Amino acid sequence: MVLRTASRLVVSFAITSRNARSLTTGSTVVSRLNDSSLLDWNKESSSSLTSFPVFDPASPGTVLAEVQSVDAAEAIEKSKDALASWRDDTTASFRSTCLSEWSRLVKSNSEDLAIIMTLESGKPLAESKGEVNYAATFLDYYAAEAIRPTGAGGGFMVPSPFATPSGGPKGNVLAVQQAVGVCALIAPWNFPMAMITRKAGPALAAGCTAIVKPSELTPLSAIALDNLAKQAGIPSDVFQVVTVSTEETPSVGELLATSPHIQKLSFTGSTRVGKLLMKQSSETVKRLSLELGGNAPFVVFEDADIDQAVTAAMASKFRNAGQTCVCADRFLVHSSVHDIFVEKLVEKTKAIKVGAGIEADTTMGPLITLQAADSVLEKVRAAIEEGATCELGGNRLDGQFFEPTILTHVSTESDIWKTESFGPVVPVVKFETEEEALTIANDSSVGLASYFCTENLSRVFRFSNSLEAGLVGVNEGIISSCVAPFGGVKESGLGREGSHLGLAEYLETKYVFINS
Ligand SMILES: NC(=O)c1ccc[n+]([C@@H]2O[C@H](COP(=O)([O-])OP(=O)(O)OC[C@H]3O[C@@H](n4cnc5c(N)ncnc54)[C@H](O)[C@@H]3O)[C@@H](O)[C@H]2O)c1
Ligand SMILES: O=CCCC(=O)O
């Protein structure tokens, strides 16, 4: 394992002279960008606004930028006022063109966007580049969906507009799909661009207006997306980004969840906050999409191709240092292939290069905060105290870096097994029968992703049918795509994002009876 620290991360607050400049960006960020105007952030407000720091996860305590907060109440007013013109006065074709142009700009600025994302989220540059492209796919996908009669083109599962005789002696039934209205979109730090476009793409395509609240840990990615949206011709009140500090977040969350002017709330983040927003939203009976936490099982059967299983396990587990809601989190390996799987996984994992994401040869970055690194360490130590064997890693490195870790003989009662680790830890448990693997895999209050490796076709159907999860990867560790319906069951959430089903989340069905 190689630990690399970031190359000099000196922050001098270089941009304060221009009047009313509301994003003060450290030289580390600006000097790396081809176009520093991506981070322009001049917000006007009738109230005095605060600002908050954005930190570099690769260098604890280093401030990358000082970002001005945005007044959420004013944003709601603007969004409400902009709704009718966007929903009723623009054509679907115009909205489609705006989304396509936004995507084109995202792609043509991908180098800068990846740098911004890496600096504030910590993920390696190659992963950030992958996410920028992934983010653009949602804009392209929903640009294409937008031009179809709303909701009709997506396929048989989306309710389509229709007209039919009433079924009675007279009259006709007409059913139409309409934009839900003003939408609040609350996004997390771990995929700071793709989780925004996955929500905003279908919202804008459907004719809704959108207020995005990014994570306070990664507002720069959202600011850059906002600037490109404006360049693409999306009116500034139709798509707004509301940056707020950690301290302001609970009250702004409550405002978005309780405002009678907001018709829908879409949230990606922890199950804890999802439950809170669900309670708060009940006051106004909002439409809800909740993409919450997971604790994905990864099952390796005795008939699996072990090399393929190891590749899939690595891809799923170590993506974004294990900070992905669909990361494999609980490894169940048949006793007959346990030792060879672990041996091969340990060998491959040793090649991971831990370091600052901005360094070209880094393959795993830091965790997002010191608290996150502490929490992973605590769970690893507790698991070892409860009898687990540490096959690799097990330690926190400098700052927020954590060693890729493999634990065997893990107790299924331990915290590392029962709760989402959100870190680069592989806990392994042996099993003997398919029934036993299924029981352990489904023994969780959440059900987002799940994975299994087998060469047996009937088992593929049988086991995937029985897993209590919204997503199933068979012999594959990365299964996210704009064309696939993404979402969980149980306490992992409500609704689906991506695919034509993602558009349906932003549409209401209205039925009109016409007397004849
Ligand atoms: N299902 C998914 O698609 C998905 C995707 C990413 C992350 N996650 C989950 O999110 C968790 C990690 O992300 P996190 O630590 O950023 O989660 P988090 O819930 O703390 O934060 C997510 C977002 O919610 C905001 N937030 C926090 N408290 C809030 C409140 N009281 N009211 C309104 N908004 C509030 C944050 O500012 C951020 O924008 C993990 O559990 C992970 O599984 C799920
Ligand atoms: O972390 C959550 C989303 C990541 C993905 O879309 O695969």
Image (cartoon, rainbow, N blue to C red):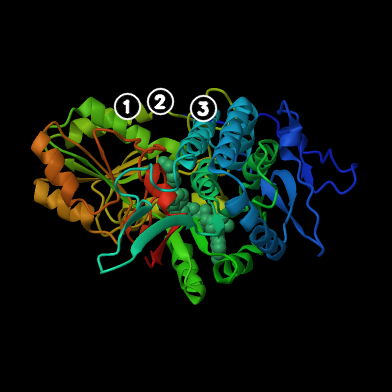
Give amino acid for label 1.
Glu
Q: Are marks 2 and 1 in contact (CB under 8 Å)?
A: yes
Give amino acid for label 3.
Ala
Residue 372 % position (x, y):
51, 52
Residue labelled with disc 2: 351
Question: Alpha carbon of mark 2 to alpha carbon of mark 1: how far?
Answer: 7 Å
Residue 259 % position (x, y):
59, 70
Give amino acid for label 2.
Ala
Residue labelled with disc 1: 347
Q: Quadrant of residue 173?
A: bottom left
Query: Mark 3 vs mark 2: which is more N-terminal?
Result: 3
Look at the image and tell me whether residue 404 can be seen.
Answer: no
Towards the viewer: 282 or 67: 282
Query: Which structural element holds mark 3?
Result: helix
Q: Residue at horizontal 34%, vertical 62%?
A: 172
Q: Residue at horizontal 68%, vertical 62%?
A: 72
Is residue 399 depicted above or below 478 in this figure?
below
